[in-house]
Image (cartoon, helix red, strand yellow):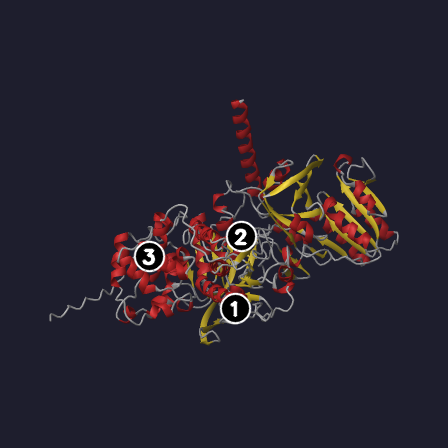
Amino acid sequence: MFRILAKEKLTPFITMLKIQAPAIARKAQPGQFVVARVDEVGERFPISLANWDNEEGSITIVVMEVGTSTRKLACLNADDHILNLAGPLGLPAHIDNFGKVVCAGGCYGIGAILPIARALKESGNEIISIIEARSKNLLYWQEPLRQVSDELIMTTGDGSYGYKGWTYDPLKEMLEKGEKVDRVFAHGCNFMMMLCSEITKPFGVKTMVSLNPIMVDGTGMCGVCRVSVGGVTKFACVDGPEFDGHEVDWELLASRRQSYIQEEIRSLEWWECQQWCLTTAKSKEA
Amino acid sequence: MEEKPKPKLDLNRVPMPRQDPKARAKNYNEVALGYTEEMALQEANRCIQCPKRPCIDGCPVNVDIPDFIKAIRDNDMAEAVRILKSKNSLPGVCGRVCPQETQCEALCSLGKKGAPIAIGRLERYVADWEQSHGSNPRPSPELPPPTDKKVAVIGSGPAGLTCAADLAKLGHEVTIFEALHVAGGVLMYGIPEFRLPKSIVQAEVDFVKSLGVDIRLDSVMGKLATVDELLEGDYDAIFLGTGAGLPMFMDIPGENLNGIYSANEFLTRVNLMKAYLFPEYDTPIKVGRRVAVIGGGNVAMDSARCALRLGANEVYIVYRRSRAEMPARLEEAENAEEEGIIFKILTNPKQFIGDNQGWVTAMECYEMELGEPDASGRRRPIVKEGSEFIIDVDVVVVALGTTPNPLIPSTTKGLETTKRGTVVADEETGKTVKDKVWAGGDVVTGAATVISAMGAGKRAAASIDAYLKR
């Protein structure tokens, strides 16, 4: 059992949880993830590490609500427990002194890009962080990111704040202006990571992405997370999750991520119905 | 003096009562129902208690088989349990899934004239008797005084559980590190409920815990801590029982289409995550209408029978050699066939065909024929050129074997591994080339049986004990 130390709702659909997990905190590195199972009937699913504190013995995750499991997580509060948590899993991000690095984050990826930007900064890189959201109120963690960046660019799809557009738009502008970028790290939804990779490819700027396929055990045992990189099948859980975005078969990844879309909808409906029944029963008792 | 009449040999074993094939193909309850007291007594009475006791040599953990059978005969069940458990910490598991027909039963003296004693079925009877008659909670066995030596066991499958239990019985302090959220390894995620009920596995895990073994779940070693870090800490010895968990694929076109599972994934979803109870349980699984399972081993049979129980209309076993070469236990292949699994032998996939949504819809296969024997001694399957044909499928399970997970070898200094990824260890002792580190089970042999892993765990425990007491 893993106790939740703190919870913060970052946006209407994105929640931060700080969890007591000293053994994981001791070994965590940027780019790694944990596999969680919230309760006895829960599924196992991966979540990127957004922060950790070895002294406090805690890890921090940023969860975007998309299905039953992420909803269950987001419903937990401080002092509640997560039944199972295994990690730190996957290979750490490759950190080095590259020179000028762009760190792009979208959705839950704004949380996941932070430890990478921090490690890159500590390795002596110049960091340009670019984050995106549909609208101003959906942006989060600007301050911690600003602290580890030489420049922070915020983009909103509706133009309500900062640059109107998405992470790859200012990235494209920079490259087209002839600005030298030595490496790009992108964390976010498939579509965002794919577009970042497509934009940098003609400029020959190596772009590392953190793939997010379906996983069960997260230790190389089941193979559901197989992705095709450079024409070779890899297991994202043990060979990744970080891969060269120019080599990834994005269409395959998108298709495999959709495998259980109908079941996911059914599962969420079932769970919401259960919650509704529970709430109704409670209010009747009261 | 009057000569005693020689007892007449009973050459036929008491059949195992089983669930009706039609009924069981729709439920997850155990297929083999187990002997009644009367049946067990009748079967035990067939044993001639021959002086040579060859059956014991056939058992990887050397259970005193004739003695426990005699105890059943004497109606001294507590003694039967004691004899069995003194050598085998997991009798309820072994009685169900050991291939006795190629081990103890293969050497039975009665086998020369008729059917050998059904040792496995009697073993299960004794284990189940203990479950239903033993006091609850079971009294902890008497343990020797602590030796103050600490051993870390990595993996809680059959090898790890056996090694841990034996070391604990010798007074050592044992911690098991398990990567998944339950203990039992392949017994939990791999072997289905209808062949090995999970309550049986957990009862055996509880027995190991009752010996004082600390089991730490959610602990992915190699990540959470390396073997070297454990040794730098306060552990005096380490046993690696991490199994063969990495699934093999065929590397043919279309293999990453949706609907194509490794057997590990398919069985884990069903057994460990209880996807057959979706949506009460959150883990989904694709219920195919026409399912092809590729492979001819026990894991292939388990996958096929699970697919049937999930509700598939037709399930095929696609195997590239003939029935005679199938590595599955005869009993399991027969069970599968009785339930309606269709065997497509001498058939091998060439490629998978998908729709525009990325889902598998068909499998193009070759017809095969058998040539000269290969390195395994089995006749080599050869492609019949121009024999390609199509099988329509919507779910495929690839059950072609597994290799050891590299997580531990790749993070441990000075461990020797083979080309197949297995850890090199002495066959008799399990000792690896690395100081203070032993290994046993599938991580050393590649995918094999539960009992051979247990045997390796047992031998390693003896060797570790000798080292700690040197």
The Cα atoms of the two marked residues, 2 and 3, are separated by 29 Å
- Indicate the position of residue B121 as horizontal and vertical percent values: 33, 58
* Mark 2: secondary structure: strand
Point 44% across, 67% down: residue: B346
Label 2 in the same subunit as label 3: yes
First in sequence: mark 2 vs mark 3: 3
- Residue B430 has which mark? 1
The chain to which mark 3 is attached is B
Q: What residue is disc 2 on? A: B215
* Mark 1: secondary structure: loop
Say which amino acid is labelled 2. Answer: Ile
The Cα atoms of the two marked residues, 2 and 1, are separated by 22 Å
Point 45% across, 48% down: residue: B310
The chain to which mark 2 is attached is B
Q: Residues within 10 Å of mark 2 (few under 14, many from 20)?
A: many
Q: Is residue B447 visible in this depiction of the protein?
A: no
Residue extending furthest toward the bottom: B372
In the rendered image of this protein, does residue B368 appear above or below residue A277? below
Q: What residue is disc 3 on? A: B79
Nearer the observer, A184 or A190:
A184
Select label 2 or label 3 by which is in front.
3
Say which amino acid is labelled 1. Answer: Gly
Label 2 in the same subunit as label 1: yes
Residue extending furthest toward the left: B1
